Amino acid sequence: MDKFVIHGGKELNGTVEISGAKNATLALMPAALLASGESVLYNTPELNDVFTMSKLLKQLGAEIQFENQVLKINSATVNNQIAPYEHVKKMRASVYVLGPLLTRYGFAKVSLPGGCAWGPRPINLHLEGLKKLGAEIELDEGYIIVKAKRLQGAKINFDKSSVGATGNILMASVLAKGTTVINNAAMEPEITNLVNFLLKMGAKIYGINTSILEIEGVDELHPAEIETIPDRIEAGTFLIAAAITKGNILIRGGIDAHLYAVLSKLEDAGMHIDVIGNDIRIDAQNIEPKSIDVSTGIFPGFPTDMQAQWLALMSVADSVSTVTDTIYTDRFSHVPELIRLGADISVQENNALIKGVKKLKGAKVMSTDLRASASLVLAGLVAEGVTEVLRVYHLDRGYQRLEEKLRQLGANIDRVAGQEF
């Protein structure tokens, strides 16, 4: 397994290009199954999660071509509606194939993601929505089996806003008979990107950028082309990289409307922010970050996917702050590793209390998930001495060549490959 070796203390300066959004891509790819023929996704990031989804679509019979961030998906050759456990177990987003396969072919057999039980999991929202659309649902030996001659439009209310469930029901309902209304739909930019793709394919969807989506089903869709939006979480991570190292970075492709909550908190923390079109400049030179409380929320609130990175910044802020995660109440696996670097953090339930310290010190730390990994890299960039971040395969799921981009900004970071640590 690879690791990063970081010699901290380098101020980051320069320009960084933001790649396409991972979470948008993972919804756009299954959407291509809804029409026969070749759809094209531009600005597609080269990530392990994208490669995993590509393997799954190939398993279903689709033809995939991926070169220079251009992903071509030919769904005319799809001849299989079974998504096996060996593919789905690697990535929860694999469940996105459920809606498209069911609505186009009338049948889908998809492994429960990660081997989770039916129980009180987010997958329930997907299944309850499909059931309201008329699907027959069966759970058999770890697989979800769904059937329907043709889905029927329905009124669907999500008790909890869910990006995944909104995307799946959207894709299922565009070929359903009649009108579907999704109340409390997710409003994340990635959902808007998906809606725009479906519209290009010939879908009829109203209420874009709102929490109430109305879908008028059509008989057939056609292939289309779309550009994937920039990854707002990658952009936010680089903004915090500038803040924590007291640097000056121009973020190319950081759409400010997608990052409003993060930018607002960074300004509260004392950073200078300048928005120029779709570019964002952050100047943190000679600025001691102020301790600012954060509570995560659904979009347009502060993203839970930025919680770990923010916590790393607050670890070296001037006073005491709190971070409350209202989305995932147990998402603090990075805290013990940050403490190994010298951070002063205590966690109780879904709240973290952070007492800023003067400096962090390098140590060997272990990645536990994608965003936790990013927080450890950020802390390593400012820590004195050498930090080794193990299991960086988590990062490769969601950041395209992160270490190369950081090196271009002046970081002393190397990937050490193929060793047992």
Image (cartoon, grey):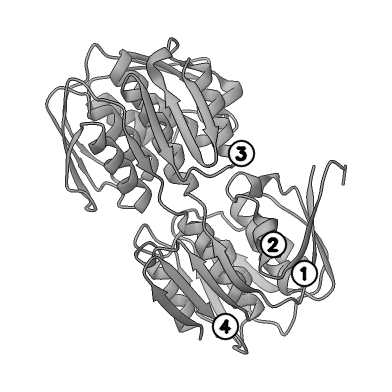
* Amino acid beneath label 4: Ala
* Amino acid beneath label 2: Leu
Of mark 4 and mark 2, the one earlier in the sequence is 4
Q: Nearer the viewer, residue 264 or 330?
A: 264
Quadrant of the rendered structure where residue 408 is? bottom right
Residue at 40% across / 69% down in the picture?
261
Do callouts 1 and 4 mark residues in contact (Cβ within 8 Å)? no
* Amino acid beneath label 3: Asn
Depth check, mark 3 against mark 1: the one in front is: 3
Q: CA distance from mark 1 to mark 4?
A: 22 Å
Name the residue that disc number 1 marks.
Answer: 341
Res. 48 mark: 3
Local SS, label 1: loop
Q: CA distance from mark 3 to mark 1?
A: 28 Å
- Is residue 55 shown above or below 289? above
Do callouts 3 and 4 mark residues in contact (Cβ within 8 Å)? no
* Amino acid beneath label 1: Leu
Residue found at the far front of this picture: 68
> Is residue 250 visible to us here?
yes
Name the residue that disc number 4 marks.
Answer: 284
Quadrant of the rendered structure where residue 151 is? top left
Of mark 2 and mark 1, the one earlier in the sequence is 1
Q: CA distance from mark 3 to mark 4?
A: 32 Å
Name the residue that disc number 2 marks.
Answer: 376
- Answer few, some or many: residues within 10 Å of disc 1's Cα (few below 14, many 20 plus, some between 14 and 19): many
- Is residue 143 shown above or below 244? above
Of mark 3 and mark 4, the one earlier in the sequence is 3
Of mark 1 and mark 4, the one earlier in the sequence is 4
- Answer few, some or many: residues within 10 Å of disc 4's Cα (few below 14, many 20 plus, some between 14 and 19): many
Local SS, label 2: helix
Q: Nearer the viewer, residue 116 or 222?
A: 222
Q: Whole-percent x and y of residue 270?
A: 51, 86
